[in-house]
């Protein structure tokens, strides 16, 4: 586990939302969440998706492979970062259109 604050926040969020049988604190960023000893299943996957969307104010694209995006803590962190970047780019583009002559 590194010193990435987003990774720590996601780890804490999932611990609260899922209450896994095995603590997530010692779990590596690339360790599978929904296989093995954690005891997490497809219902937990949906709970994790909803928790992340609500906490970070995101709406994941329906075409996104959620099983892959939420396979590990590292994958969730990368997904959140990508979604935030996409949202920021969309907001900047919208602001630029609104500021352009005849825009808005």
Image (cartoon, rainbow, N blue to C red):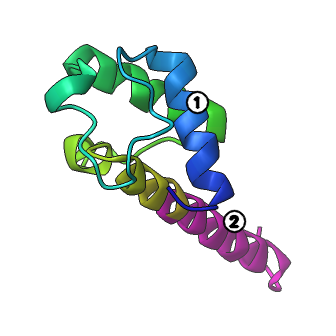
Report crowding for label 2: few under 14, some 14 to 19, many 20 or more residues within 10 A (C-alpha).
few
- Up the image or down, 80 lies above or below 50; here it is below
Image disc number at residue 13: 1
Nearest to the observer: residue 33 or residue 22: 22
Asked whether residue 80 appears in the rendered view, the answer is yes
Judged left or right of residue 66, residue 77 is right
Can you give x and y, in whole percent of width and height, for residue 104 in the image? Answer: 77, 67
Residue farthest along the bottom direction in this orientation: 101
Q: Which segment did they paint magenta?
A: 82-104
- Up the image or down, 88 lies above or below 31; here it is below
Which residue does the numbered mark 2 point to in the structure image? 91
Q: Residue at x 69, y 65 (%)?
A: 91
Which callout, 1 or 2, points at the residue further toward the start of the chain? 1
Can you give x and y, in whole percent of width and height, for residue 78 in the image? Answer: 44, 61
Image disc number at residue 53: none
Q: Nearer the viewer, mark 1 or mark 2?
A: 1
């Amino acid at each position: 586990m590194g010193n990435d604050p987003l990774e720590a926040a996601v780890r804490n969020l999932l611990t609260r939302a899922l209450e896994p049988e095995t603590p997530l604190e010692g779990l590596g960023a690339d360790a599978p969440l929904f296989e093995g000893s954690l005891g997490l299943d497809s219902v937990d996957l949906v709970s994790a998706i909803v928790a992340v969307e609500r906490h970070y104010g995101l709406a994941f694209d329906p075409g996104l492979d959620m099983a892959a995006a939420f396979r590990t803590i590292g994958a969730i962190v990368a997904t959140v970062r990508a979604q935030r970047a996409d949202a920021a780019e969309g907001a900047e583009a919208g602001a630029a259109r609104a500021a352009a002559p005849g825009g808005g």
